[in-house]
Every structure is written in C-alpha cells, then in structure tokens.
Image (cartoon, rainbow, N blue to C red):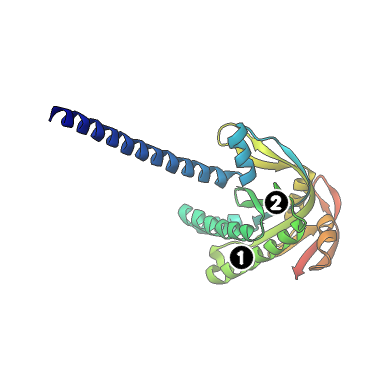
C-alpha cells in the first residue's frame, strides 16, 4: 500500500508539473504573438524579422519608390468646431480608412505627423508598379474624403495630396519609441508636391508623371515655385 501511495504521488506530481509546463508554454506563446503583432504594427514585416534575428536592422537605400504625402487643408478651422475627443475620433476614422487603402496596394505607411500622413511604395520589397499603386491609392483616398464630406459636412476635412518618385534611405531611428522612417530629396519633394496641391487635388511631380502618364489623365500645371527647390513641373491627376 505504501509503495502504491508513493508511486501515485510521484505520478500526480509529474502530471501536475507537465500541466504547469504546458500552461507556462501557452502563456509564453501568447505573449510572443502579442509582441510580434505589436512589432508588425510598427515595422514592415521584413524589417521586424531582421530586428528579431539580429537585434538590429541596417539602414538601406532604395532606388525606385514612390512617396505619398497628405494633409488636411482646413484642419485648424474644423478643429475649432470639434471637442478634443471628436477631433481625435475624426482623425482616427480618416487615417484608419487610409490604412486600409494602403493595404490594398502594398503601400507601407510610415507615420502620421499631426494631420499629415506619409506612406511609400517600393520598399522594403521592390515593386514595378510603385508609382501606379500610389496614384491609385491617392484616387481612393480622395474619393473616401469626398464621401466623408458629403456625410459629415463641416465636421470633417478637405484633403491635399502630393506624390513624388525617386530614391530614399530607410531605417530605424531612436531607442525609446523607435520608428521606421525614410529620408532623402525624394521625400522632401513629395512634401513640396503636397504643399503646392489644392483641396481635393492630387499633385504629382515630373518624375512620377513620366511613370504614370500612359495610365492616368494628367493636367500639366506648369513650373511652380517650391520652397527651397526652385521651380518644379507639377501635374494634377484627374482619373484613370
């Protein structure tokens, strides 16, 4: 009887230990999934994988990308009419819609800066249709905001969009609240395209125009003075 009791207790302890180990492994697995999901919400999948494997991710140069900038022309006016929570809710609704459109065209969202939105196509995975994809996305963003304006009137925003193509450097900066970002003259010129656009318009550079001119109807605007860039050829994209 004593031997039976001893063996039974050993069996019970071993079984409990196995159950505890399984529960521990399950918790670890769930926490890993959460951390991976959070990392993918901040970084492109390829960059996140490199960061997990090496503990760091190298900055890289990308030759053929297209950069998109948007901002809201009447942001200050609308913000004065909304409560802080209503303002944040409306920004969230707009940027969530933009995020979904970016996903359709394999465009990498980089960040939001106040009421501005920055995204790029062609990195970290190259795409022959980087310019076409961004213009298509811009047309959908414009339609999204037009429909939102019809629904909400003065409680939403008018959008300006700027696009430019070229090369950029991309990488991770910072230690606390680090971020994946892009730099280069291509980014600066895309910002100038946005600044020189108009409400409800998509303003593209000469470089982007040469890549999409056979796929979209474009209106030449002439050479327009851009801050720190001199005169630049600009085009409004109207439709497919």
SS category of the residue bearing label 2: strand
Find the residue positioned furthest to the left: 1
Between the C-alphas of marks 2 and 1, the distance is 20 Å
Residue 132 picture location, percent across and down: 75, 61
Depicted 78 relative to depicted 8: above or below = below
Residue 71 picture location, percent across and down: 65, 55
Q: Residue at x 84, y 55 (%)?
A: 207
Q: Nearer the viewer, residue 94 or 79?
A: 94
- Are the residues tagged 2 and 1 within 8 Å (C-beta)? no
What label sits on residue 145 in the rendered view?
Answer: 1
Where's the C terminus, which quadrant?
bottom right
Q: Quadrant of residue 157?
A: bottom right
Tell me which numbered mark, 2 or 1, is placed earlier along the sequence: 2
Q: Badge 2: few (under 14), some or many (20 or more) residues near its Cα, within 10 Å?
A: many
Q: Nearer the viewer, residue 77 or 64?
A: 64
Depicted 160 relative to depicted 146: above or below = above
Q: Quadrant of residue 237?
A: bottom right
Q: Nearer the viewer, residue 54 or 79?
A: 54
Residue 110 picture location, percent across and down: 64, 47
Of labels 2 and 1, the one closer to you: 2
Q: Residue at x 65, y 65 (%)?
A: 140
Q: Is residue 122 left or right of residue 87?
A: right
SS category of the residue bearing label 1: helix
Residue 20 picture location, percent across and down: 32, 36
Where's the N terminus, which quadrant?
top left
Q: Is residue 59 visible?
A: yes
Q: Is residue 44 visible?
A: no
What label sits on residue 120 in the rendered view?
Answer: 2
């Amino acid at each position: 009887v004593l031997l039976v009791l001893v063996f039974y207790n050993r069996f019970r302890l071993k079984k409990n230990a196995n159950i505890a180990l399984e529960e521990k492994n399950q918790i670890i697995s769930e926490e890993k999934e959460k951390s991976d999901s959070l990392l993918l919400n901040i970084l492109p999948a390829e960059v996140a994988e490199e960061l997990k494997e090496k503990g760091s991710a190298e900055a890289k140069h990308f030759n053929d990308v297209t950069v998109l900038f948007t901002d809201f022309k009447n942001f200050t006016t609308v913000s004065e009419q909304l409560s802080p929570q209503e303002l944040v809710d409306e920004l969230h609704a707009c940027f969530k819609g933009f995020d979904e459109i970016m996903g359709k065209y394999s465009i990498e969202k980089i960040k939001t800066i106040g009421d501005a939105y920055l995204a790029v196509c062609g990195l970290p995975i190259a795409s022959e249709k980087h310019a076409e994809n961004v213009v298509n996305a811009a047309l959908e963003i414009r339609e999204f905001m037009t429909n939102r304006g019809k629904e909400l009137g003065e409680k939403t925003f008018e959008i300006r969009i700027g696009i430019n193509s070229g090369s950029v450097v991309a990488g991770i900066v910072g230690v606390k609240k680090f971020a994946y970002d892009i730099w280069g003259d291509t980014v600066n010129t895309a910002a100038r395209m946005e600044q020189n656009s108009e409400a409800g318009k998509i303003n593209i550079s000469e470089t982007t125009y040469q890549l999409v001119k056979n796929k979209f109807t474009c209106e030449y605007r002439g050479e327009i003075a851009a801050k720190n860039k001199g005169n630049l050829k600009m085009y409004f994209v109207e439709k497919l």
